Image (tube, grey):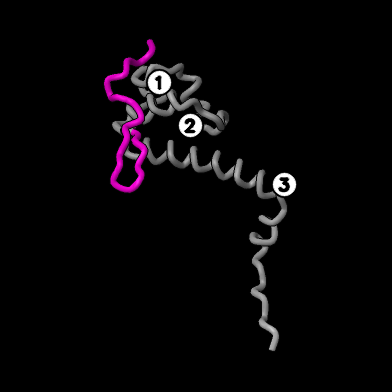
Amino acid sequence: MKKKSKQLSTFEREMKDAKFKAAFEKEYQELALQELLASMSENDEKSVRALAKEAGLHPNAVQNLRSGKTTDIKLTSFLKIARAHGYELELVKGKVHIPVASRREPAYK
């Protein structure tokens, strides 16, 4: 008796195409970054200018990140924005927690 093969969803079929998969993964990472930035600022009513000043970044850089115009961000800029919202970043593997940078890192002015 022959086993019936599982029918693939449209998404599963598309993900078998290397070009589609690469484009999807790139766009998904960009969307994930936008969602992460939005989540960090959700309950924080800082203006673009106030956030930029606190993070030590140019207001245009912050606005471009918020709007999605900039889709790639340097880790240092991301850390500054996260800290301005009160977050810290650490790497976690099991019970090991490694802080990415100290909280007292000076902001650029």
The dot on residue 19 is 3
**Classed neighbour count for the residue bearing mark 1: other residues with Cα under 10 Å, few (<14), some (14–19), many (≥20):** many
Q: Are marks 1 and 2 in contact (CB under 8 Å)?
A: no
- In space, the residues marked 1 and 2 are separated at their CA atoms by 11 Å
Q: Quadrant of residue 70?
A: top right
Q: Which mark is residue 20?
A: none
| Mark 2, residue position | 66
* Residue on which disc 1 sits: 52
- How far apart, in angstroms, are the residues tagged by discs 3 and 1? 37 Å
Expressed as whole percent of the image width and height from the top left, the position of residue 34 reads 49, 38
Q: Nearer the viewer, residue 73 or 101?
A: 101
Q: Which residues are magenta?
A: 89-109
* Inter-mark Cα distance, 2 to 3: 28 Å
Query: What is the quadrant of residue 72 in the picture?
Result: top right
Q: Secondary structure at mark 3?
A: helix
Q: Main secondary structure of the magenta part?
A: loop
Residue 96 falls within the magenta-colored stretch: yes
Quadrant in which the N terminus is drawn: bottom right
Q: Amino acid at mark 3?
A: Lys
